[in-house]
């Protein structure tokens, strides 16, 4: 069974979406370690990214974005920017965009992706309202993980209904700005991604 694939989308694929791509991997690895699971993350989850524009295709990550990932304990090895294609969207189980405009771009490029594409900040809010007890049991086995992840996407799509993202759900574009801005944006990305990991790989129940 192929891993559950999350595709992160921003404009140039050198700042926001690369941070989200690598920070999701970091958060999931940390959670698996806390669970004491011997599962290989690569068997469960694939995190990728792309940009709506191709100006930076083939380039490395923007240095301040790379710094934020390294400071948090993640890796930037092997990253190169790429332009979003319909093939990338078709191969993704969950699509997370930096802004609502980019979600609109995704829908125009592949209308069938609408039910599994969200502004990252909007998804973070939706996850707080989902009845996680109604999802398949949490698992670190590939089949069980994929079943829960797929059900989560369906529940999130149902949960948003016809509610549009709020302006505050958009991530600022930090390109050309200082490390403080990159840190703030990375913190916002982390907040939403940790909410996602909390649902996909919930921690052990607390003892009474």
Image (cartoon, rainbow, N blue to C red):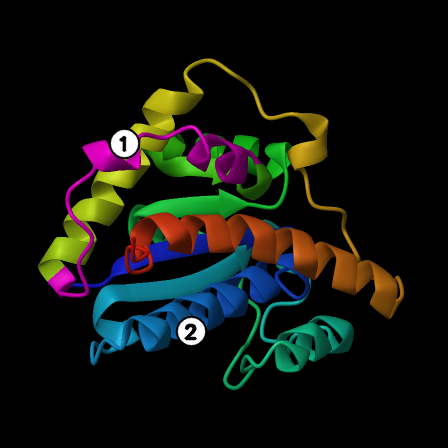
Q: Is residue 136 magenta?
A: yes
Instruction: Pinpoint residue 37: horizontal percent, then vertical percent.
Output: 23, 76
Q: Which residue is mark 2?
A: 30
- Find residue 6 and report its image quarter: bottom left
Q: Residue at x 28, y 55 (%)?
A: 205
- Find residue 17 and report its image quarter: bottom right
Mark 1 crowdedness (10 Å alpha carbons): few <14, some 14-19, many ≥20: some
The residue range painted magenta reads 122-142
Q: Residue at x 20, y 32 (%)?
A: 134
The quadrant the N terminus occupies is bottom left
Q: Is residue 129 magenta?
A: yes
Relative horizontal placement of residue 31, taking residue 189 as reference (left or right): left
Residue furthest to the top? 162
Mark 2 crowdedness (10 Å alpha carbons): few <14, some 14-19, many ≥20: some
Give the number of marks. Answer: 2
Q: In this picture, is 64 found above or below 155?
A: below
- Find residue 189 and report its image quarter: bottom right
Q: In this picture, is 14 found above or below 88?
A: below
Q: Which mark is residue 154?
A: 1
Q: Tell me the element at label 2.
A: helix
Instruction: Pinpoint residue 75: horizontal percent, then vertical percent.
Output: 54, 82
Labelled pair 1, 2 in contact (Cβ < 8 Å): no
Instruction: Pinpoint residue 55: horizontal percent, then vertical percent.
Output: 68, 61
Q: In this picture, is 30 found above or below 48?
A: below
């Amino acid at each position: 069974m192929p891993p559950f694939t999350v595709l992160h989308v921003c404009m140039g694929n050198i700042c926001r979406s690369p941070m989200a791509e690598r920070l999701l991997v970091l958060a999931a690895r940390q959670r698996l370690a806390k669970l004491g699971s011997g599962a290989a993350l690569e068997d469960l989850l694939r995190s990728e990214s792309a940009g709506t524009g191709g100006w930076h295709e083939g380039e490395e990550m923007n240095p301040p974005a790379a710094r934020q990932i390294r400071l948090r304990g993640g890796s930037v090895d092997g990253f190169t920017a790429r332009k979003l294609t319909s093939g990338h969207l078709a191969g993704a189980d969950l699509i997370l965009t930096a802004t609502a405009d980019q979600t609109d771009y995704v829908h125009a490029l592949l209308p069938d992706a609408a039910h599994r594409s969200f502004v990252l900040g909007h998804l973070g809010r939706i996850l707080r309202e989902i009845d996680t007890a109604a999802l398949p049991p949490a698992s670190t086995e590939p089949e069980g993980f994929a079943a829960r992840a797929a059900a989560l996407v369906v529940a999130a799509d149902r949960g948003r209904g016809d509610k549009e993202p709020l302006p505050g759900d958009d991530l600022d574009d930090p390109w050309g700005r200082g490390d403080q801005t990159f840190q703030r944006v990375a913190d916002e990305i982390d907040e939403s991604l940790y909410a996602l990991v909390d649902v996909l790989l919930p921690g052990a129940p607390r003892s009474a």
